[in-house]
Image (cartoon, grey):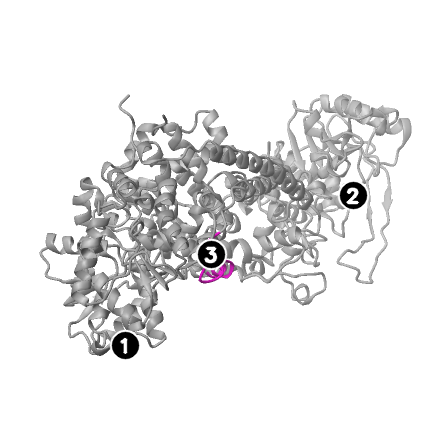
Amino acid sequence: MNYVDFLLWVRGPAFQIATAIFIFGLSWRLLEILSLSRKPELAVVRERGIAGGFRTIFRRFLPVDDNTFQRSAFIITAGYIFHLGFFIILLLFVPHILFFREFFGFSWPGLPTPVIGIITIMTLLALIALLINRMRHPVLRFLSGFEDYFVWIVTFLPVLTGYMAFHHFFHYPLMLALHILSVELLMIVFPFTKLMHTFTWFISRWYTGSRAAQKGVQV
Amino acid sequence: MNWELGNFVPIYYNQDLTGFGNLFFLRTFIFRKSYKGKNMSTPQTIYESLHHQGFSRRDFLKFCGISATIMGLSPSMIPRIAKALENTPKKSVIWLSFQECTGCTESLIRAHAPTIEGLIFDHISLDYHHTLQAASGRAAEQARENAMKEHHGDYLLVVDGSIPMGNPGYSTSAGISSLDMLKEVASGAGAIIAIGTCAAYGGLPHAAPNPTGAVSVEELITNKPLINIPGCPPIPAVIAGVISYIVTFGQLPKRDSLKRPITFFGQNIHDRCYRRSFYDQGLFANSFDDEGAKKGWCLYKLGCKGPVTYNACATTKWNENVSFPIEAGHGCLGCSEPHFWDAGHFYQALSVPTREIVGTAGYALAAGAAVGVASAMLNKKKKVDATKNHETVTIHDLERTSS
Amino acid sequence: MSTASFERGYNAFKEKIDAPIASYFSSCVHCGMCAQACMFFTETGDPKYTPIYKLEPMRKVWEQEYTLLGKLKALLGISQKLTDAELAEWQELIYGSCTLCGRCSMVCPVGNDLAYMIHKAREGIAAAGHAPKGLIDATKRAVIIGSAMGVKLATLQAQIKHTEHNTGIRIPLDEPGVDYLVILSALEVVNFPEYLEALAKIMKQADKTWTLSSIAFEATNPGLQIGVSDIAKELVSRVINVAEELGVSTVISPECGHAYTAIRWEGPNLIGRSFSFKVQHILEVLDELREQGKLKTEGFEKARLTFHDPCQLIRRGGVIEQPRHLLKMVATHFVEMEDPGKMNWCCGGGGGLVTQEESEELRTKAFNRKKTQLDALEVDTLVTACSNCRIVLEEGFEAYEMEMPVVGLTEMVAEHLVESEV
């Protein structure tokens, strides 16, 4: 298979398959989680839980207090640089916006490409720092298994190959194909790994926040 | 019958001066002189031919210099080229046209005075070409057969157009199918040049659903040295440059993994595009004729396939270095790459998948929901059963009995 | 005759897993922030105390029973099934190094309520027979005798006599139709009788009717701490039944953390219906009386003091502001700890941990966190509103050779009641 066939395959059938598996897995797993439901609160509540749940969705973006931040300063800072960087690249880089326009039917303005470039470097560095931390910090080393490292790789590769492709490292069509392939890999493993937190984080925050709000505690 | 190049082949082109795009037609004549009286056992060399036409030694050396430049060779090569052309006899060339639009030929013969291409034509012996030959019918086929016999093992086979495998009858000439013709002529050829994306990779006939079963030359002939000069059509100077090289050095130039000469196909359009800085900055035209387009911004959003296309358009350009599609305001179609007709919509960017995604996602959502609902029902049942299985835990049930 | 078994434990896990728990397990990214909020980790540095790790047995059950993928992995032999040995091994983590304080739930970036999960996980471990002996014994005493400390009615009656003598106020017993049914933690009966005295005085000044119950005077609930809903339900039902029989308006939960949780928040869910009466913590009652102008105090504490927030009352119970209002009424030199209110650090003795002798050393190490908080403040007195916290704090101060008196807030407020009205 030459590089042209490879690129056409990743841009064509492979992307269809990856999208299908991604969406299929997402809808299946979300239903699976929600199906277990939660018993309603029978005690007299201090506040309605629904609003409290949504408040927690937003409050939890920031550490609850300064000391919590200090104790986890690295993870919080590097974690945000990675997450924000990743989503800025994904959603505000013009070639990606064109893809979303195809999917959603509407588009939005992007950031200047050199800015995206700088953000990409920061994201890659944050990811590497997070990996080193995971391998060295006693708690993270203790908790981490194959899935944690595998997920790191499938998250790192799209950012790296995207940067390399854009800057024409090596052979552009091949780099572009590798970039798209790495994204497809991410999409395929997504619903079956902890990457699901991308879609369950607000569910978890809502459940916790609603019960706490019912008790009158802002979390 | 002794077949010689000696026919007067006038070709007229209309001059269009209204400024539509950057294309223009030139009025030219290509003369083929008669070499009656020349002993055929010692064919005329290229230098002799030029000299005969009235070109001085100085003109000849200038020609060698220009050839060197076109072939990407250093000036120190000029003496070698001169020597080669002085001693190189005119190469017999048989040009076969199959499922093609004749665009490649049209490209090649675009010329103006003085023409490098025309000169080169005088220095190969074009023994068979459907469009350019004056003869027709039996006489034409006879000329081909003669050339094949006389220069067996040495003649250059040039092919444009793809070959249909669905039914040999889709493309025939003189009652012979393209497939048979190709196999026959290829068997005695010294080397094969596949000109144009159709011959090189299947081209337009090969585009989905490929109703004729079109294939490229290299899919059929694997036992001869082969070079592809893709493009739809290829740049005139590129065709000329490659033929020059082969004639001069008697071998095929260095090729890439798709068998294209690296000199002309070694860089991608994007790397040499004059609009590249706009791409790097993220300044894109959003539609044809909008502000960005008028300012000459990058055409990525309008579907330019420059980044994945290898050709000389951005440097050598077209019409004697005047312009190329991007400069004219239209994105590159990627016409020198295999399957470019099926590589996604021409006006959709490279970052857009070539297949339909929304419907796929819709089906996947439904299928996933079905599986999710099934799992949900299993979960609910399991929980209900667990609750049913519950035995009230009393203080006597908190420790294991000693058995 | 059924007893504890691995099957019963496994079944209990299956019963307790719900959508929040499924979402929580799906969301955990192994970031380790929960460890940084847990004093058992911060004061020992041992990563096995990481809260999410405590939930590994329950995670296995969730994955293998409630996810198709997990079922597939188990079928292919890729994942390990839960074993009885593992449950036994996890006793140390789920009971022996966790007070259900809930600090981890406050910091998890994806919003997991780990304390909620650990409490449910106890259901499985207990039904499998792997709850710690000390806690099992306390639970047995609570069910059989009526109190985890083994306090019987006779002890209470003796205490009532003392109180009546000291205060000159009649302590009502089994009186129907009153404003408040008062329940007590056994610790208050035995160690801190000042509480009952304070309560009597305050009720008199506020002109409220109240009563104790001779058959349901115990507020604490080891069933809740051991994590067995059936037993928790039985214990809390004793109070509920009496409250409804007597037809009281409100049940007052005493200065205890988990007792409040047991009746205020868990109670209705355990019995499957809401109550016909209100439930308030004594601090809520006092603050209400203060707002109504029915709590009159004079004078202020001279000492510089701070407040230790009992976890189940403040962070998990929602009674956050009331102690502050009350303290400001009777103290001029009240200072907050660093990490006050809902982020305060646990005393280290809740959740049934005090019943486990084997965890004493660990508890002492963890107490260093509280000590650090106090060292920074240089206060003379520590005020709190949970008698278990009081005991644990006193033990901790002794271990670290700190001089720090611990006072109950109700008692402190009562000391400042305007004399003439009492």
Mark 1 element type: loop
Q: Nearer the viewer, mark 3 or mark 2?
A: 3
Tell whether label 2 touches label 3 (CB within 8 Å). no
Measuring from the top left, give residue B264's x and y in whole percent.
Answer: 62, 44
- Residue A47 highlighted magenta (yes or no): yes
User: For the residue marked with disc 3, what is the amino acid?
Assistant: Ser
Mark 3 element type: helix
Using the rendered image of the protein, determine whether residue B237 is visible from the camera's viewpoint.
Answer: yes
The residues bearing labels 3 and 1 have C-alpha atoms spaced at a distance of: 37 Å
Mark 3 Cα shell of 10 Å, populated few (<14), some (14-19), many (≥20): many
Tell whether label 1 touches label 2 (CB within 8 Å). no
Q: Nearer the viewer, mark 3 or mark 1?
A: 1
Write the residue at 62% across / 53% down: A100
Q: Which residue is mark 1?
A: C296
Write the residue at 50% across / 57% down: A88
Mark 2 element type: helix
Which of the 4 image quadrants contains residue A66? bottom left
Q: Which residue is mark 2?
A: B103
Measuring from the top left, give residue C360's x and y in whole percent.
Answer: 17, 44
Looking at the image, which is closer to me, A33 or C120? C120
Q: Which residue is mark 3?
A: A210
Same subunit, tags 2 and 1: no
- Does C112 appear above or below B254? below
Range of magenta residues: A41-55
